[in-house]
Every structure is written in structure tokens, then in C-alpha cells.
Amino acid sequence: MKKILVTGANGQLAKCIKNAAPHFPDLQFIFVSKEELDIQDAGLLREFFQKNNYSHCINTAAYTNVEKAESEPEIAFTINAEAVKILATVCKEMNVILFHISTDYVFDGIKNSPYIETDPTNPINVYGASKLKGEQYIQEILDKFFIFRTSWLYSQYGHNFLRTIIKYADEGKPLTITTEQTGTPTNANDLANALLQLIEQDSINYGVYHFSNEGETTWYGFAEEILRQRGKLKDTNLAKTNHYRTFAARPEYSVLDNAKFKNTFTVPAVNWLESLDIVIKNLLDNK
Ligand SMILES: NC(=O)C1=CN([C@@H]2O[C@H](COP(=O)(O)OP(=O)(O)OC[C@H]3O[C@@H](n4cnc5c(N)ncnc54)[C@H](OP(=O)(O)O)[C@@H]3O)[C@@H](O)[C@H]2O)C=CC1
Ligand SMILES: Cc1cn([C@H]2C[C@H](O)[C@@H](COP(=O)(O)OP(=O)(O)O[C@H]3O[C@@H](C)C(=O)[C@@H](O)[C@H]3O)O2)c(=O)[nH]c1=O
């Protein structure tokens, strides 16, 4: 039986993986939180892998605060790059297949058509630079790895744009949302399912892939659709802006081209609007 270690167990993607796990009875999962396994701790990481016979590791652990990363780059790089280097080294020693998640923020956003895997990277914020360094270490160290660059992840869990918008709208707060960036909101449940399907299918098509939902919008478009589907659009004071002030720069355009993923694997693509509908209904059902 395949034995899969999932790091960062309290994060949104790990929670989506946990949710999907019962649909994959042939896979055995061990979920470890930051408190149980800090991926910065090389000694503990080695001990963990030596004691257990993992076939795969899904690394969802990451430093994901894009704004804060600008003022604490050393922490972002320690987690997103140096710890990933150690993890990759241990996976190599133990012959474990690493599934790692990266981001659309490795690109600078000056392209105006969807990014493919071989497009030049050029991160414009600390978070993106730290994630790129993590990708580079994996590619230097490992042969058996998958890196999935995804974008604008949201779900029913954790901190994400969807939950922020719903919270503010429920509190009756006015919303001012930027039209300055275009990308693709991606349901983390879709990514979780895709990862588990690839493990189940024993895929050996290792490498870097783009994986997002289909279509594109701006953050304003995403917020508007969240409110519309939630039945809150009329009651919410929603305004557009083209100069929302942030500490971190973000790519103006970061739509990912999923063609390589779609041509390699038999996992159906889902449009972002349809996937959003599922998450919104799930949130309403569980209220
Ligand atoms: N969220 C998004 O929009 C996107 C995310 N990604 C990537 O997808 C992956 C999953 O993201 P997501 O689930 O949203 O992120 P979250 O921030 O929800 O989860 C990350 C988890 O990792 C934990 N963590 C942080 N540092 C360590 C550490 N040193 N050791 C072990 N665990 C640690 C965090 O704990 P704590 O919170 O306590 O620090 C948190 O529980 C990440 O690699 C991210 O870069 C890619 C594109 C978009
Ligand atoms: C909360 C808020 C944000 N914004 C803007 C700020 C920013 O330009 C954009 C998105 O804001 P957020 O801070 O929620 O999202 P951000 O942290 O930039 O999201 C990113 O997270 C990392 C982890 C990734 O890998 C990326 O793919 C992406 O999902 O919306 C508004 O315009 N109005 C608002 O009220």
C-alpha cells in the first residue's frame, strides 16, 4: 500500500486532501502539522523518514503570507526554500516521491497570454522568489518529483480570499477590490483530488506542471462572483479600484496554461465558476 506523508496538516490544501482521502481507500495517509513536524528541523525530518516507510510526500507546508514576507524575507526563504532543500534531500535518500506545490507568483506578470511551464520566471515579490528557490532546489536534488504551480487557491478552509470576502460581506463592511491583477481562482479541493489521482495512478511523468481551474478573472471579478453566488451582491457595498495599496507587488497577469497537465494526465479540467459554485454551496450547507 502506498504510504503518503502530508506536511502542513493545518493548512487549507492539507485539509482538502484530508477531506478527499476517504475516496482513495488504497492510499494510506499520515498528516503532520507544523507542531508535529516542522520542516525546518532537519534532524526531526530525517528521524521521521527513517522510522516510517513512506512512498510519497505531499509538501503543503509553506510560508504563504505574501504581504508579511516583504518584511521577513529570511523566514520566507527558510521555509519555502531551505527547508524544501532538506526535504528534497531526505526524499532522495529514502527514495520517496515528492509532490510539491508552487505558485503563479514565480512569474512577473508582463506576459498577456497564459504562462507555460518553460516561460522564464522572474518573481516580483519575496514570497514568489522564495517559492522559486524551493522549486530550483527540488529540481537540482531529485529525479522523482512533481511540482505543481497553482494560483489563487481558495476553499472552505483556512485563510483565503473567498473566506475574507464572505466574512466582510456578512459583517456588512464595504469592499473595495482591485482590478489590477488577472489570474485564475483555483478550488484547493480540485488540486487535492488531482494530486491523489496521480498518486493512485502511479504516474511517473515527473516534472513541473501548471494546474489551475480554467478561465480567468480579476480579484474584483472573483469578489463579485463570490457575492453573486452567495446571494449577497445586492446588499454589499462593492467598489472597484485600480490602485489598491499593498506592501508586496503582484503579477498583473498570472493565468497558467494547463495544457501540459491536461495532455499528460487523465484528470478532468474544471471551470473556476463551476468550482466556486460547489464551494459556496458546501459552505451554505454546513452553516
Ligand atoms: N494559498 C494560495 O493562494 C496558494 C498557495 N500555493 C501553495 O500551495 C501550498 C499550500 O498552500 P495553502 O494550503 O493555501 O497554505 P496555508 O498557509 O493554508 O498552509 C500552509 C501550512 O504550512 C504550515 N507551515 C508553515 N511553516 C511550516 C513549517 N516550517 N513546517 C511545517 N509546516 C509549516 C502552516 O502553519 P502555520 O499557519 O501555523 O504557519 C500552514 O498550516 C503552499 O506551498 C503554497 O505556497 C500556491 C498558489 C496559491
Ligand atoms: C482583502 C483585499 C485584497 N485586495 C487585493 C490585494 C491583492 O492585490 C489581491 C489579493 O489579495 P490577497 O492578499 O487576498 O491574496 P494574495 O495573498 O496575493 O494571494 C496569493 O497567495 C499566494 C499564497 C499565492 O500563491 C497566490 O497564488 C495568490 O493566491 O486583492 C483588495 O483589492 N481588496 C481587499 O479588500
Image (cartoon, rainbow, N blue to C red):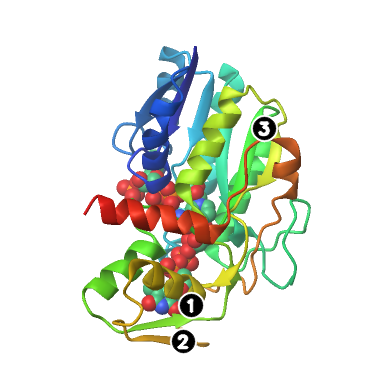
Asked if the beta carbon under badge 1 is closer than 8 A to the nearest atom of ligand 2, the reply is yes
Q: Identify which residue, 167 or 106, lies in the foreground.
A: 167
- Judged from the image, the secondary structure of the residue bearing numbered disc 2 is strand
Q: Position of residue 72 (x, y in %)?
A: 42, 62
- Judged from the image, the secondary structure of the residue bearing numbered disc 1 is helix
The tag on residue 141 is 3
Along the polypeptide, which appears first: circle 2 or circle 1? 1
| Amino acid marked by disc 1 | Tyr
The tag on residue 240 is 2
- The residue at 63%/22% (across/down) is 202
Disc 3: CA contacts within 10 A as few (<14), some (14-19) or many (>=20): some
| Amino acid marked by disc 2 | Lys
> Is 238 left or right of 268, judged from the image as shown?
left
Question: Whole-Å distance between the Cαs marked 3 and 1?
Answer: 40 Å
Disc 1: CA contacts within 10 A as few (<14), some (14-19) or many (>=20): many
Q: Are marks 2 and 1 in contact (CB under 8 Å)?
A: yes
For disc 1, the marked residue is 220
| Amino acid marked by disc 3 | Ile
Asked if the beta carbon under badge 3 is closer than 8 A to the nearest atom of ligand 1, the reply is no
Q: Position of residue 10 (x, y in %)?
A: 32, 42
Q: How many marks?
A: 3
